[in-house]
Structure formats: C-alpha cells, structure tokens
Image (cartoon, rainbow, N blue to C red):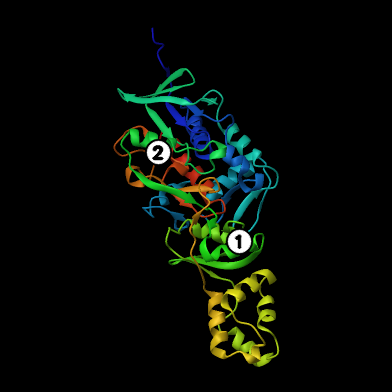
Amino acid sequence: MTKSPTPYDAIILGAGGAGLMCAAIAGQRGRKVLLIDHVDQPGKKILISGGGRCNFTNIHTAPDRYLSANKHFAKSALSRYTAQDFIDLVNGHGIAWHEKTLGQLFCDGSAKQIVAMLMDQCPDDAVTLSLGQSVTGISHADGQYHVSYGGKNAAAPSLVIATGGPSIPKMGATSFAYDVARQFGLKIVEPRPALVPLTLGGEETLFRSLSGVSAPIVASCGKTAFREAALFTHKGLSGPAILQISSYWRHGEAVNVDFLPDLKPNWLTRLKREAPRLTLSRAVNTHLPARLAETLLDRIALSGDLGNLGDRKLEETGRRLSNWRFMPNGTEGYAKAEVTAGGISTAELSSKNMEARQMPGLYAIGEAVDVTGWLGGYNFQWAWASGWAAGQSL
C-alpha cells in the first residue's frame, strides 16, 4: 500500500538565498513549508560569496542594473523589498557590516551570519528543512504538486523553483531548475555564464604573460561600459571591470579597453612639447604597470624620445591606448562564472509574485529566472526581493 504524501502549503526546491527568504516569509505568514535541497547545508553560495564575508546587497540597487529579456520585470519586486529592507533585517540581528566600494555591503565577520539569520527567520513550527535529499520525481494532479525526494513523498498546492542556475557546479549547482520549468511548459531564455573571466587566443595569447598584472580601466562592449580594475590571467582577462562587461559580451564581439581613462587621446603630443627628451616608454610607464606598458608598446611597435616621434603617430598611440580592442575567444565557463544569465523566461511569470501565468501555484525565483544583476551584491538583492515577493503570495 502506497503511503499518502505528507501535506504542506508550499514546497520550495532549493535552500539558497532566494529559497531561504521565500521559506522565511511564507513561514512567518503561517504557511507550512517544506524546503528541499540536494546539498548538505543551506546557503552554500552565500557562504563562499565575497571572500567568505558575503556581499549581501548594494545600496545603489535599481532595475537598470539587471539584465533580462524584459528590462522592466524586476521593478516590482525590487521596489517592494529594497536594499534598505534587507539592511534593516541585518541590523536587527546585530550583524556588523561595512561598505567596500560602489555601494557594496559586506559582513565585518562572516557570511555564516547571513545564513544563520535567514535560518533564524524560518519559524521552526512552519518550515521543515530537508538537506542532502535529491528530488526523484515531480508531478501535478488535482491542484497539487507531488514531489518525491529521499524515499519520501510530499504534496502542496504551491511549488517554488529556487535551485538557481548551473554556475559554480562544484557547489552543487545544476540546470535542474530549467528541467522542472520545461516539464510544466515554461520557456527558457538560453542560459550562459555571466560575471565570468574572458579568455584570449590567437595573437592575443601574448597578454597571458602579464598574468597577475592589474590596472584601473574602462571596459566597454556596445553601449555598456564599466570603470573598475582589470586583471590579466594565464587564460586571458578578469577583474571586476571584465566580469561586469562579460555579462553583456557575446561570442564574436570585441571588448574595448581604455587603459588611460583619465587622459585625453592627445596627451602624448602635449607632453612632447613639455619634455621632448622623455622616452615614449617612460611616458606610458608613468600611468601603467611597467610590464603592461611594455607589452602594449611592443604591439604598437613605436619607441624613442617623444621629440623624435611625429604628432600623428603619438596621437594614434594615444587613441590605441584609450581604445584597445580585444577579441575574446570565449569565457572560463560555468566553473568560474559567479552567476548565470538567462533562465526561466520572465514572459512566463507574474512580476508581482513570480507565479507562472499558465500554471497556477508554480513559482520561480532568484537566479533560476532570466534576471541577472551586476557584480557587487545586486544578485543577492534580487534573491531577497524575488523570494520575498513569492513568499508573500504562497
């Protein structure tokens, strides 16, 4: 005789940031929630984020700092659960924090404090946590979602997909969210690695010899540009500016780098009038790490005293250094991607509560959805806001 499934008000798949927030809010509203994850501890990505200190939000959160096929989709959730709302929660738990740069907020202590806070927000009498249990079956009948996991069965009128995307597979990340979404007819925007280092090939492999060299730059792709540090690696380009622009880059496109964002393109000709005996390499070395300056000038194939070089060649050199064109041949993939761009199509979901339009009781939140934030706490804020929105509706 088959044992009847244990009844719940909602089953949440995935105990990451979005899933924990959703369970906490629904539990506080008196809902009986089952929270399932195939990994052995909640909030695994939270624990490794920000060098173990969790960049938990960004005070500059705004919808225009997110990528999505529908640029308006994130507005509702982000406006109803703001960065300040999460800061208030953090403060209420006595967690000390600091702003690093560009509005990025980190714990003074450990990311473990954020996970503990979210767990503390889940009422013991409302939220049942099942860890280390793989889901073996999902079905829907008579208004109930049936989930089989770890030899058990559960049923609920609501099912929440909160298992994220495939980025950082060593943390247990998979494309499971898309499999569930497709099972119920939801469309997927093609997923791809985002906030990920770019790789260089061909003639540009010589830049790999600069591995470990960093410099403040402006990286641009199309109409989008970011001013932060770039880092050369043994595979290509990384650092905050490159991770940011990687989310906008597509195969076959160039990434333009301004190595001298504070100088006008004609700075060398002006310097020539002031110091004609200064060598070109010394002039560029003043503004860039020596190894980087040497490699760039080797590619330009220009050297000598400024006074012996023509204005046109100096102006052309200034322009090259201010608009250096890299042609990445790929990325370092999901293994090194901080997040996944694309995912469950926002066209399938209500922007107010994250419920599937054609499948009542089915929700998708967090990274599983086609909403991807900039580097610096934006993706966590989306996790909190989308989790809160769904939790209010369960």
Q: Amino acid at mark 1?
A: Arg
287 relative to 109, above or below: below
- Residue in front for this viewpoint, 170 or 208: 208
Q: Hey, what amino acid is under mark 2? A: Tyr
Considering every residue shown, the one lying at the far top of the view is 1
Query: What numbered label is drawn on residue 208?
Result: 1
184 or 160, which lies in front? 184
Q: Are marks 1 and 2 in contact (CB under 8 Å)?
A: no
User: Label 1's element?
Assistant: helix
**In the orientation shown, which residue stands out farthest toward the front?**
202
Query: What numbered label is drawn on residue 178?
Result: 2
Please state the horizontal and vertical placement of residue 265, each as a whole percent of the image.
55, 81
In the rendered image, the quadrant that contains the N terminus is top left
- The residue that appears at 52% across and 33% down in the rendered structure is 15
**Could you say which quadrant of the image residue 307 lies in?**
bottom right
Q: Secondary structure at mark 2?
A: helix
**Which mark identifies residue 56?**
none
* Quadrant housing residue 250: bottom left
